[in-house]
Each structure stands twice: as C-alpha cells, then as structure tokens.
Image (cartoon, helix red, strand yellow):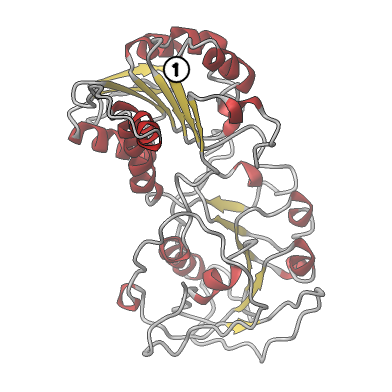
Amino acid sequence: MGHAGPGLRSEPCLRLPRRPRHEQGETRPRHSPASHAPLRARPDLGVVSRGGSRHPPRGLRIRGPAPRHARRVTAPTILVYHPEEARDYARLIRLPRRGATVVACATPAEADAVIAEAEILYGWGVPAALLARAARLRWIQCMGAGVERFLVPEVPAGVTITRAAGIFGPWMAEYVLGWSLWVTQRMETFRQRQRERRWVGEHPARLHGATICIIGLGDIGRAIARSARSFAMTVVGVSRSGRRVREASAVYRTSAMRRALARADFVVVTLPLTDETRGLIGAAELSAMKPSAWLINIARGQVVEEAPLVKALSEHRIGGAILDVFEREPLPPEHPLWSLHNAVITPHISGPSTPDEIAVIFNDNLRRYLSGRPLRHVVSRRRGY
C-alpha cells in the first residue's frame, strides 16, 4: 500500500528498513491518485535509522508563500508515527502549497530524535513520554477515531487535536451485522456438526424484526443503524442528549439506558472512552438485558466492566458477547473470557485504519492548516471526542 501511480512525481521517497505489515483485515481498494489535490511541492524526507540517528534532508523545498496566519520562513516538520505502517502513511502525504520535512518513525527511539522539532504529529499509538518532549507541536492528527491517548497532560491545551471521522462506520457496520448473522444463523453449531459428520437440523433465527440497541449515535453508530434497517431490524439508540435521529425509531438518554437494553436482542457499544463512559456498562446494565440478548463491544474495553461481564456470561444471564476491545490489550492468555463458549474474541479489528483512507482526511486538514483555515474533526477536550 501507499505507492502512487507512475504520473505522480511528488511522492516522498522513504528508505526505512522493511517492516512486517500489520494485518487488520482485508484491504480496501485504495483511492486513485486523481482523488488527491494537484501536487505542487515535494516533501523532503528526513529518514530515521534503527539506531535513532537522523539523516539530514536534502534541503527544504518551499514553493509559494508561507501561510498568511504564520508567515514562517521555514517549512513545518511533520512527524509520522505508526508502529507498522509509518512509511505507507508518509508516502501518501500531499503538499499543495509548500514544502515540508516529513519524518516517518516506527519506534519511540526513532521518534525521539525528531519529536522536539515536530510542528505536526500524524500518528497512532504514540507514547505519552514522546508527547512530553514535543515542544513545538501545534497540531495532532490522530489516525483513528479514538483520541484518549492524546487527551493527556503531556499535550498542552494550545495543541489542536483532530480525529479520523467518517470512514470507520462502514467497516464496523459490516462487523456488527456479520457477527449478528453468525448468531442468528447458528453458524458455530452447524460448523461443529460438520466436524462431527452429523446431519441434525435446527431452525435458525432471523435478524428481520429483531431489535438492535446502539449505544452511541455518532457517525459510526448511525452507519450501523442504517445497515441494521436494511435487514428490517428495529433500531433503538442511546445517547447523552436523547435527541432523535432518523436512523432510529426511538432514542433514550443515557440516564434511561436500561429501558432500551430491556428491548434489545443485540446491544452494540460504539461510545468513545471518556470519564463519563468509563464503566458505563456494568452489572446493573447487563442484568437489564434479555437472557437471550448478545452484547457487541466495538468501542473501548473500559466502557464495559469485564468482571460483571464474565459473571453474566458464565451464568448464562445473557446470550453471549462479541468482543473486539478489552480493558487490557492484547487480552492476556489467562483471561477467563478465552474459555467461555458464548464469548467471541477478535483482536481489535472491527474498524481498521488504512493509510489510503486516513490520507484523505489528513491531506484535507493539511491544506487547511497551511492556508490558515479551520481544521475539520477537531476534538473537544471537555467532551473527550
């Protein structure tokens, strides 16, 4: 991923050591080069070696005036940080107005050599210790939807944080509906009978007419709701405000969430992790669910209390759980969730970040940043998302 077509001459040239790719599901078709803005400047690549020493760039290439709001005489340094795909993200950066120094780093040791110079951080999984040394940092573009890693004291209030929004909904809707069908079509049962060579009939259930409760009605929650409605499911939602949305037949305030839970055959958690949502789903909420209902958590592990969940699953007080996120990741081998037959464990893959999709968001915001315009998808520190 990350290679532009033969006509793109302004693609950065990275020479980092070859690293294994992080497998996060099937790769989507990449955006065609034509979907990017016209290319007018080439980023200079400062390459960081495994030892942490940085090879100096070949010289700054500034084409066009500096942004009106800054009038700088030097180009910004963009630090691209990702443990597996830093090179791919960096290759897709497009600079329509002026040059920049782009540094791709995959480890804290590599990033430590340049973090003090970085004005822009484009990253995922950045350690807080690195953020504390980012003295010149003005803007962070997160490669994911969750931003809790950046809402820490190490990031001053004057640093703008933006998130990746609008692209994870379709991925997560497929995850939710796919596993919901796995439940209703009794796929595990029939696979087991195939292994046993037993021809035993059992009627599947239907999604048609089932009720799905979606906790969190942001762009991801609404995308799931639209997909659920295509299966003729009844959609109820839960949000802090309780404001109606067209994708749901009813919306409950968080304070009335148990009423929504009692109606649902499937409960889907899509909330960001904030002080308000931490531990939101506990023993009382699980007790409000139907004994046949399934919980699907694609938000953050800390939103659902794991000890009460393990107890509810072990005692069959709910039908089961599809879990993509956990309080501790990777989930420790000794964790009791692994051994529960009514729990499905997936390794945080429901909403993968792909370089091609995130690049569209970053490049749009980069053009805005360099021209002094407001950025999109700015995070509210007060709300936590």
Please tell me whether mark 1 sits on a helix, a strand or a loop: helix
Find residue 80 and report its horizontal and vertical position in percent: 61, 67
Residue 223 or 95: which is nearer the viewer?
Answer: 223
Q: Which corner quadrant of the image does residue 195 belong to? A: top left
Find residue 365 and report its horizontal and vertical position in percent: 46, 62
Q: Residue at x 32, y 36 (%)?
A: 177
- Is 39 above or below relative to 183? below
Residue 34 or 196: which is nearer the viewer?
Answer: 196
Asked whether, in this view, residue 313 is left or right of residue 224, the answer is: right
Q: Which residue is mark 1?
A: 254
Q: Which corner quadrant of the image does residue 312 belong to? A: top right
Find residue 268 and report its horizontal and vertical position in percent: 41, 28
- Is 292 above or below relative to 54? above
Q: Residue at x 47, y 52 (%)?
A: 352
- Is 300 above or below relative to 174? above
Mark 1 surroundings: few (<14), some (14-19) or many (≥20) residues within 10 A: some
Q: Residue at x 48, y 23 (%)?
A: 342
Find residue 151 and report its horizontal and vertical position in percent: 65, 42
* Amino acid beneath label 1: Thr
Query: Residue farthest to the front?
Result: 197
- Is 159 above or below relative to 314? below
